[in-house]
Image (cartoon, rainbow, N blue to C red):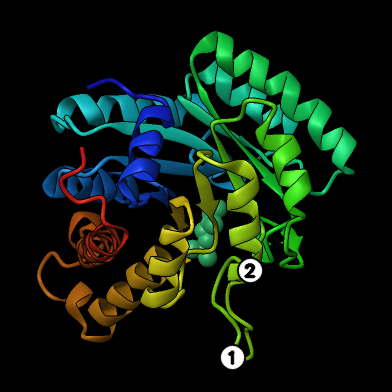
């Protein structure tokens, strides 16, 4: 199946009270592991690409070529959306041109009027081209690709203003942060989430910073209208731990253990295990 936008999968998820995972990709191994696992689990999936990861993978056109090629050659039949993560205005336009099926415009650092104006313009372009679009209100804390956010709680009225522009999905800050959660993290603000959900109705809500959020909080967030959950760091940590183990056990020194196809295999398997676990937890298994 060719790339799809994220609208249908997220509308179904919201109505069915589960969430679709967005797993960020960094290279070929990442992409392959995520696609194969989504297929094995019969789950829809969203591949997230940050601007930094896009640059690392030699630009958006390279990413589009790689993902389209893999979908065809691996025989992937579950719905796959290729989504720009935390895009700038220029980045969003570049991804639309390059053939992404979905974009996020993160205007959360602009004053609300400017966020509205820019989001509105991109909504019109996405509508015309059949792409889905995610907007953000209230910046997500932590650091991602040099963008540092303080972990705000979004203003539900501002969320309603952005939702009314016709975006497909909305990321609202609810005390979530990217990367590992600190020991003294106060947890998700379900009060904010409930207020945002009440104002935005059927709009699929997005939970960023999926790494390390306890299962009960994930469940509660899904019950309160979260239909897309982003995971990045957890796959990176799984990959790192498995690769470290392989080298510490001296396996790269045995036989042809230096071959990148062998060296990167344990990390790739670890990503698969992480994605499998998340798909189970988010409830999107067999929802393709
Ligand atoms: P984590 O890296 O904390 O999983 O967050 C991912 C994310 O929200 C991508 O936008």
Element carrying mark 2: helix
Q: Quadrant of residue 4?
A: top left
Q: Position of residue 82 (x, y in %)?
A: 42, 33
Q: Position of residue 217 (x, y in %)?
A: 45, 73
Q: Which residue is mark 2?
A: 191
Question: Residue at coordinates 41% horizontally, 60% vertically from top-left?
Answer: 223
Q: Which residue is mark 1?
A: 183
Q: Quadrant of residue 145?
A: bottom right
Does residue 122 sit above or below 148 in this rendering? above
Question: Residue at coordinates 47% horizontally, 63% vertically from top-left?
Answer: 221
Upstream in the sequence, badge 2 or badge 1?
1
Residue 138 — which label? none
Q: Is residue 240 left or right of residue 109?
A: left
Q: Position of residue 15 (x, y in %)?
A: 35, 41
Q: Quadrant of residue 125?
A: top right
Does residue 258 sit above or below 53 in this rendering? below
Task: Give the distance between the C-alpha atoms of the residues marked 2 and 1, in whole angstroms.
Answer: 21 Å
Question: Residue at coordinates 34% horizontally, 77% vertically from top-left?
Answer: 241
Q: Position of residue 3 (x, y in %)?
A: 34, 24
Residue sticking out furthest to the top: 128
Residue sticking out furthest to the bottom: 183
Split into 4 quadrants, where in the image is the C terminus? top left
Q: Is residue 262 left or right of residue 83?
A: left
Residue 111 appearing in the image: yes
In front of the other: 109 or 234: 109
Element carrying mark 1: loop
Residue 176 appearing in the image: no
Split into 4 quadrants, where in the image is the N terminus? top left
Q: Nearer the viewer, mark 2 or mark 1?
A: 2
**Cβ at disc 2 under 8 Å from ligand 1:** no
Does residue 236 sit above or below 6 in this rendering? below
In front of the other: 238 or 6: 6
């Amino acid at each position: 199946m060719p790339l799809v936008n994220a609208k249908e999968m997220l509308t179904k998820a919201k109505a069915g009270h589960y969430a679709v995972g967005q797993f960020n990709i960094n290279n070929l191994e990442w992409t392959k592991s995520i696609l194969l696992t989504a297929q094995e689990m019969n789950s829809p999936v969203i591949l997230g690409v940050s601007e930094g990861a896009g640059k690392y993978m030699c630009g958006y056109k390279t990413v589009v070529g790689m993902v389209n090629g893999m979908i065809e050659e691996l025989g992937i039949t579950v719905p796959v959306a290729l989504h720009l993560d935390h895009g700038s205005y220029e980045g969003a336009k570049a991804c639309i041109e390059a053939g992404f099926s979905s974009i996020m415009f993160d205007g959360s650092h602009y004053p609300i009027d400017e966020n509205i104006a820019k989001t509105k313009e991109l909504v019109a372009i996405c509508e015309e081209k059949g792409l889905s679009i995610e907007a953000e209100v209230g910046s997500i804390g932590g650091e991602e690709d040099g963008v540092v956010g303080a972990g705000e709680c979004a203003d539900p009225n501002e969320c309603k203003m952005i939702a009314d522009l016709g975006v497909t999905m909305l990321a609202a800050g609810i005390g979530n942060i990217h990367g590992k959660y600190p020991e003294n993290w106060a947890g998700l603000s379900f009060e904010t989430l409930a207020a945002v959900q009440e104002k935005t109705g059927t709009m699929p809500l997005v939970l960023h910073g999926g790494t390390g959020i306890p299962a009960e909080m994930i469940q509660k967030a899904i019950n309160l209208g979260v239909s897309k959950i982003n995971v990045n760091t957890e796959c990176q940590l799984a990959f790192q731990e498995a690769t470290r183990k392989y080298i510490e056990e001296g396996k790269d020194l045995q036989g042809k253990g230096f071959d990148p196809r062998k060296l990167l295999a344990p990390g790739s398997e670890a990503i698969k295990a992480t994605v499998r676990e998340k798909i189970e937890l988010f409830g999107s298994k067999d929802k393709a």
